[in-house]
Structure formats: structure tokens, C-alpha cells
Amino acid sequence: MKRFATLAPALLAGLLLLAGCGRVADGFARLRADALCAAHQPDKAIAWYARIASNRQDAVVLRAMVKVYARRDDHTNLAATCARLALVATNLADVRALTITLLNSDHAPLALPHIRRMIALAPDNWSYKEVLITALRDAGQTNAIPRALRRFARHMPADSTNFLCLGLLWLSENDTSNGIVCLTRALALEPQHHALRQTLAATLLETKQYAATLATLAGLASNHAAHADVQLMLADAYNGVGQAARAMPHYRRAIQRAPHNAVALNNYAYCLLQCGGNLSEAYELALSAVQQDRQPYALDTLALACYQKGAYDTALRLLREAEQLADAAGAQFDPEIAYHFGLCYAARGDMTNAVRRFRAALAQQPALRADLARQPFFKTIESQLPPPHELLESTP
């Protein structure tokens, strides 16, 4: 017993020496690994990181290892190291650093639990919630997005900022119905928030809720209502409810404030063409819109102006260009372009192509039949068109 007592201090000293050597070795390994990372030698770096004793692989070392595994696309070791890092990353900054590393290396599925942890640590930070929605989309988990948004709604305080942020996220997922509900609730809580009012009005206009658009814009202060974008929304909304005469002054004001706005120029031209307004003015407006933005919508309006002027060949050339640009951009079929093709073909006496275009247009937009029925040639082709009830049944 006495002999053991004599040896104990020596053993203790030896153990401390070994521990000290271990710390020195680990420190050297860490320095070496960091240097190799900086030199863009990840394979050698990870070998040196692995030499560090596991109990001394702190958050800094584990983050460095995560970066190396992510760069090497070593999914197995990346997942395992992330799990270890999650245990020692106790503050928001550490979790955010880990998340950024994973997202920057295109490992969205592995980042998801860490993004959710960020949200738990900072529940009022909507940028983290937006990151989660983006990561779910990148990970191919689109079905989880509505569930996540509803979860946000259940756990957030009912204030205007939260409803606005949630509404914008719904809109980013092309869910205008839920987006409008949230934006409407936000505006009810903060009616003087003019940017919010304009966002809601734009969304309502996009979904063709023209009367609601007008009601929403009615609450704008006069200095905000004077803006070109607001004047254009008012014009489009009045035109949408069939009040072209009230729309025109707003179109003119929008163009006065933004003379190079292609959408304002185009929409005013189209309004004039639809309601039998000044054809020369409509043509000049449509031509200016094309010069500003040579896109299918503007080419279509200019083609309609050419058709009404009797320049059918020019109109067909413009429509073909509009169709080609739309196809190249992968845009959806535009029934109005098809309808205007039909009008031009009919004017040239090519009723075979006219009927083919009219059938395609009516299949997508049955309401065009009302205008078609007013054309002088309608009775000669009516039997070749689907009956109105068939068009209504085929429209979703």
C-alpha cells in the first residue's frame, strides 16, 4: 500500500504529461488542417482534423469539417458531422453558420432541421421562415410548404407585420387566395400602410377582382394615388368593370407620369381599340409600347390596331412574331392572340385558318364568343364552332 502511494504522484505526473502532449498534438493538427483548408487541399485537411481527439473537436473544428465534407460532397460524413455540430452549437450564430454552409453547398435537405432550429430560436425573424420555404422548394418537398405556412400562422402574434410577411410568402407560392386573405387582415390592422394597400390592390387586380381593387385603392392618400403605378391600376380596374370612359383619364395620367411605361401605353391602346376610340391614337400608343418593350402582349395590341386599320398582312406578321416569342419563352397559350389571328384570316377570306384559330381561342376563353358573334361573317362559320354549352363545360 505504501509502495502504491509512492508511485501515485509519478503516475499522475505521467498522465498529465500525456494529456498535455495530447493537447499540443491536437493543437498542431488543428493548425495544420486549417492551413491545408486555406490552401484548398480538403482531402489532406480532413485527415488532420480527424487526428484531433473527438472530445476536443469543438464547434469551430466541426464547422470546418462540415465545410470540407460539403466541398467533397461526402453526404454520409457530412450528415454525421452536422448531427455532432448540432449538439454543441447552442447559440443562433452557430446554427446560422452551419445552415449557411449547407445551403451554399446545395445540401438543402440536411439544412432543413437547422433552419427550423433557427426559427425556434428567433421566432419573429421572417427571413429565416423565408429561407425555410426556399429550402423546402429546393429539396423537392413542395407539399410541405403549405403546412409550414399554416404552422407559421398558428404560432404568430396577430399583427400587421406578421400578416404582411405571411401573405407575401403565400404569394411567392402563387397562392393568391391565402395571400389576399393575409394582406387584407394586415391592412385592417394598419389602414394607413400605403405600400401594403398597393400590394393588395395589385394582387386583386392580377386575379381580376376589379371592384375589390377599386375599393382598396380608394383608401390611398392623394399623394400616393397620384403615382403612375396607382393610376395604371385604377385604369385597368375601371376598364375591367366595363367603365372605359372612367379608365381613360387614369391611363393618360399614368402615361404623363411615366411616358416610357410600356404596359400603360399598351393597355391604353387596347382600351381605345376595344371601345372604338381614336384609332390613330391607339396605333401610335401601341407602336410606342412595342418600341419600349417588344413582347408578345405589345405586339398583339399593335397587330389589332393594324387589323382595324385594314393592314392585315402587317397584323399577321406581328402576330406570328408574338407567337414565336411566346413559344420561345415557354409561355402559356394566349387565346387573344389566337382570336386576333382568326380575325385577320377571316378578313383575308381564309376561313379555314380563321375557324381553326377561333376554335382554339374559344376553347380557352369562351367569353370571346360574344365579340365573335358581332362579326359580319359569324353566321357563315357558326356551325363550325363548338356550341356555347360545350365551351362552358370544357372550361375548368
Image: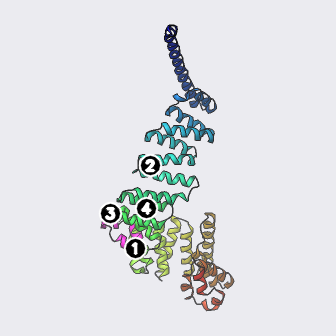
Q: Which residue is mark 1?
A: 212
N-terminal label among 3 and 2? 2
Instruction: Say which residue label 3 marks.
Output: 189
Q: Which SS does the magenta portion mostly show?
A: helix
Looking at the rendered structure, the secondary structure element under dot 1 is helix
Verify CB contact (< 8 Å) between mark 4 and mark 1.
Answer: no
In this view, 194 is above or below 354:
above
In the rendered view, would you say 197 is above or below 396? above
Query: 392 and 58: which one is in front?
Result: 58
Q: How is the image coloured?
A: rainbow
- Give the CA distance from mark 3 to mark 2: 25 Å
| Circle 3/circle 4 CB separation < 8 Å | no
Horizontally, residue 203 falls left or right of residue 57, namely left
Q: Mark 1 is on which residue type?
A: Ala
Residue depicted at x 39% and y 56%:
156
Numbered range of the magenta stretch: 215-235
- Real-space CA distance between mark 3 and mark 1, rounded to the nearest whole angstrom: 18 Å
